[in-house]
Each structure stands twice: as C-alpha cells, then as structure tokens.
Image (tube, helix red, strand yellow):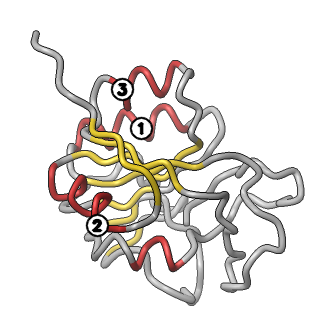
C-alpha cells in the first residue's frame, strides 16, 4: 500500500502495504503514486512506483493507477488528483459523509466497492498485521475499465454512481 495513517491505533507506523489478495483481484496497474519506500517489495502494486521521495502527487501520472493514499488530511488532495486523472482505483476509508467523499467520489467517481469485512494490511516487510484496519474500507473506481474490475473482483458490494446531467 502507500504511506498512510490507517485507522487502527495499533498500527503505530505510516507505511503499510495493501493486502495482496485485494490487488490480485483488480488486475494489473501501470502506476502506484503512493508506494512506500522499500529496498525490496514483497509484492508489486503496479509496474511503476512513486514514493514520498518522488513526491508522487506532483509527478506526471500515466495509465491505470492504483492508489492507496495517506488516510489523513492529505487524502483529499490525492483524491482530487486521481479524479482528475480519470483512470484508476483508490482505496480509502468508507466515510461517505465527508467533504472529501462528496467532492471526489459522489460527484466524480464511476463506482464504489464497499469491501466485505475489514482488511488486514501488511508491514513493509510483507508480514500481515494481527489487527484489522479498524474502519470500513472502500475502493473507488474512475473509468469504466476500473468499474469492470470492481464488478468482477468479488471483494464486496459495488455501487455504480450515475452521472448527473449538467
């Protein structure tokens, strides 16, 4: 996964990896702009990785993006960026009432998948945390290829988001 302060107070670190069983069900990604700084990756999230050292938010994005952004105050900036990019899937807390959700999900995404259960993220060395995320998690799709990936993933319930007429 990416740099993030996930919900559980047990986590005590900002570097966590997305569980491989989630990534495996979504297909191949071209870019992860929020990848943790690792000398060796236990599994890849995309063909190319930007880390905090690269400042992935300001880099040029390309192709299909996998994004597990920081879960704190910076998440809204990352969500605006993937919505502008228009081709990717973001993993975020399922806080459907927040300003960020209204700005970048309800009004700009094509679908949301509410993950069944609460996933266990992994430490940078690949070991699974003994505690779960502590909050519900969702996957947000931008672009029809990514909606199709959510629909066939079997990871939870998918809610298509209809476009409102201007």
Q: Nearer the viewer, residue 1 or 150?
A: 150
Work out whether mark 1 precedes mark 2 in sequence or the reverse, and give the earlier one: 1
Task: Assign the N terminus to one quadrant of the image.
Answer: bottom right
Q: Quadrant of residue 56?
A: bottom left
Q: In percent of the image, x 69 and y 68: which residue is there?
A: 120
Q: Secondary structure at mark 3?
A: helix
Which class describes the residues within 10 Å of circle 2: few (<14), some (14-19), or many (20+)? few
Q: Quadrant of the C terminus?
A: top left
How far apart marks 3 and 2 lie (CA) works out to: 21 Å
Depicted 38 relative to depicted 107: above or below: below
Dot 3 alpha-carbon crowd within 10 angstroms: few under 14, some 14 to 19, many 20 or more? some
The alpha-carbon separation of the residues under discs 1 and 2 comes to 23 Å
Q: Earlier in the sequence, mark 3 or mark 2?
A: 3
* Front of the two marks 3 and 2: 2
Please give the name of the residue rendered at 49% of the width and 52% of the height, measured from the top-left corner: 91
Q: Secondary structure at mark 1?
A: helix
Left or right for 14, reference 49: right
Q: Residue at 76%, 62% (x, y): give it.
A: 132
Q: Residue 79 bears which disc, if any?
A: 1
Residue identifier under label 2: 152
- Image coordinates for residue 31, horizontal then vertical, percent: 31, 66
Q: Which residue is mark 3?
A: 106
Q: Are marks 1 and 2 in contact (CB under 8 Å)?
A: no
Q: Position of residue 111 (x, y in %)?
A: 30, 42
């Amino acid at each position: 996964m990416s740099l993030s302060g996930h919900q559980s107070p047990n986590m005590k670190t900002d570097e966590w990896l997305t569980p491989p069983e989630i990534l495996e069900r979504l297909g191949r990604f071209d870019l992860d702009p929020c990848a943790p700084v690792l000398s060796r990756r236990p599994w890849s999230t995309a063909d190319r990785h930007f880390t905090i050292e690269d400042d992935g938010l300001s880099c040029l994005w390309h192709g299909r993006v996998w994004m597990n952004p920081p879960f704190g105050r910076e998440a809204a900036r990352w969500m605006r960026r993937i919505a502008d990019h228009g081709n990717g899937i973001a993993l975020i807390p399922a806080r459907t009432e927040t300003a960020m959700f209204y700005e970048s999900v309800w009004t700009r995404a094509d679908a949301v998948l509410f993950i069944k259960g609460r996933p266990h993220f992994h430490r940078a060395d690949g070991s699974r945390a003994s505690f779960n995320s502590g909050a519900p998690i969702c996957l947000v799709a931008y672009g029809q290829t990514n909606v199709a990936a959510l629909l066939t993933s079997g990871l939870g319930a998918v809610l298509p988001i209809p476009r409102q007429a201007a």
